[in-house]
Image (spheres, helix red, strand yellow):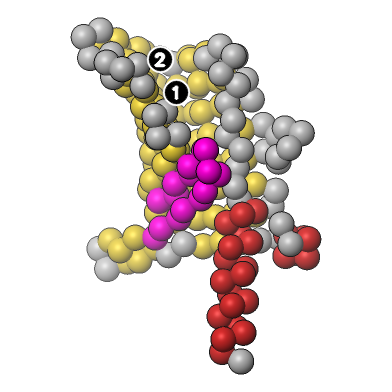
Amino acid sequence: MTLRFNLSKQAILCTALFALQPVWSVDTEQPIEISADAAIREEPSGKTTYSGDVVLTQGGLRINADSLIFDIDSSGASVITATGTPATLTQQATDKSASVDASASNIEYQESAERIRLTGKAKILQAGAVIEGNTIDYEVGTQRVMAAGSLEDDTSQRVKVTLPPSTLRDGQ
């Protein structure tokens, strides 16, 4: 009986993570538009910092943040870091996936690793399903979601997954 219960818990967790696999497929053919109160460009380092009510849009993607840093290395690879209370990311629904809403203290996109990392009260909502944790990593190429809790100041934050009944019924 214990084995069956453990397998059921594992199946539910796998279902939960599969159901929450967002499709952050930014249309790279669309222009990036950024509005902010201020911008500072550091030409030698390839770093641009936007601050004050920052809004980035590209196709169906929208990021709202207190600050946004574009850091482009010498090879042309970029790291985009959004910081806020919280920073938010919204991907509009497509024919293949439901809309995605994400929030965290920091949202970082590493172009070369094709990874999005949410840290600090991280949360992703998609099709009624929710995953929360201190850190959530999403690997774009493999569509792999990894969530972790934290132990800070004698308080622990565990990973929390909420699934709508339809997700469990439909086996998604």
The residue range painted magenta reads: 135-149
Q: Residue furthest left?
A: 44
Residue under the point 23% across and 14% down: 45
In the image, 63 versus 73, the foreground residue is 73
SS for callout 1 = strand
Name the amino acid, label 1: Asp
Residue with the mark numbered 1: 53
Mark 2 Cα shell of 10 Å, populated few (<14), some (14-19), many (≥20): few
Residue under the point 61% across and 38% down: 23
| Count of labels in the image | 2
Residue with the mark numbered 2: 37
Residue 147's image quarter?
bottom left
Q: Is residue 117 visible?
A: yes
Sequence-first disc among 1 and 2 = 2
| Residue 78 spot, x, y in % from top left | 37, 23
Question: Is residue 3 toward the left or the right of residue 154 in the image?
Answer: right
State which quarter of the image contains the C terminus. Answer: bottom right
Q: Looking at the image, is 165 positioned above or below residue 59?
A: below
Q: Looking at the image, is 45 positioned above or below residue 91?
A: above
